Image (spheres, grey):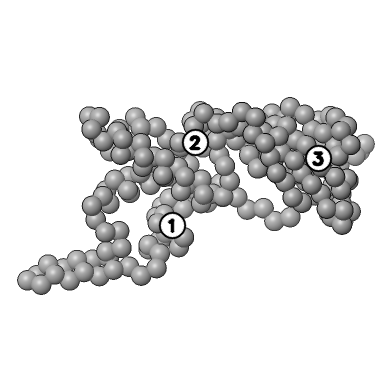
Amino acid sequence: MDSFYDITTAARTSDLTTLETVKRELKIENNDENETLTRYIREASNDVTNWIGRPLAQVTVNQFFVIERHKAFRREPLPLCVKWYPIVQINQLLDWDGTLLVEDVDYEVDFTSGRIWRISASSTPVRCFWSSGKITVDYIGGYALLDDLPYAIEEACIEMVKYRWHERGRDPMVRSETVVGVETVDYWVGGMPGGSESMAIPGKVTGLLEPYREVRIL
């Protein structure tokens, strides 16, 4: 199942924490480092979002699903899986022929996971959305930052900013240094210990984020 989308109302921010929160965590009382910390927050928010594997900030969006004909008759139920979730509200859902479908009559929604199931007259999931054409879902999805963002995600972002702050001016690949007459420096090879291989995310952060990571197998 392929999908594409058109955002009609963009998120006001993608930052997963605030400058004030980070400064309080770091016990910084002046404004001298505001620009640097703001950049760290933006970069950390991007890293966290990429690691989770899905956008987090709330938007209003039209998402279009194109179902291949050979997949329209599967034995197991096949839901539509929206890109932004949790789903806050579905404004309208149009079938391939433009028919307006009605919630709890024609389809049911798992708002938390962002899955939409076609239902039959007996209120049970049918095989899938039957058409091989384009299905349109106009909805509001994602977290209203920072009002309903799970705290673990914000905490992960804060930890990433703190990590960057305390590592300033030091080579992050240095594993150990010995200065006894002659300096000895050991370097890490590959990913950072306890972190992601693809980016320098500490194990503590990945542990916080794991429950929210995008894993969908259909």
The amino acid beneath tag 2 is Ser
Distance between the alpha carbons at the discs numbered 2 and 3: 28 Å
Task: State which quadrant residue 71 falls in.
Answer: bottom right
- Which disc is residue 13 wearing? none
Q: Earlier in the sequence, mark 1 or mark 3?
A: 3
Q: Visible in this render: residue 210?
A: yes
Name the residue tied to disc 3.
135
At a point 60% along the width and 35% down the height, the residue shown is 142
* Element carrying mark 3: strand
The amino acid beneath tag 1 is Met
Looking at the figure, which quarter contains the C terminus? bottom right
Pick the front one: 206 or 97: 97
Tell me whether circle 1 and circle 3 mark residues in contact (CB < 8 Å).
no
* Residue 15 picture location, percent across and down: 45, 36
* Element carrying mark 2: loop
Q: Visible in this render: residue 148?
A: no
At a point 30% along the width and 39% down the height, the residue shown is 36
Distance between the alpha carbons at the discs numbered 1 and 3: 36 Å
At a point 71% along the width and 34% down the height, the residue shown is 62
* Residue 190 picture location, percent across and down: 39, 68
Task: State which quadrant residue 134 falls in.
Answer: top right
Name the residue tied to disc 2.
14
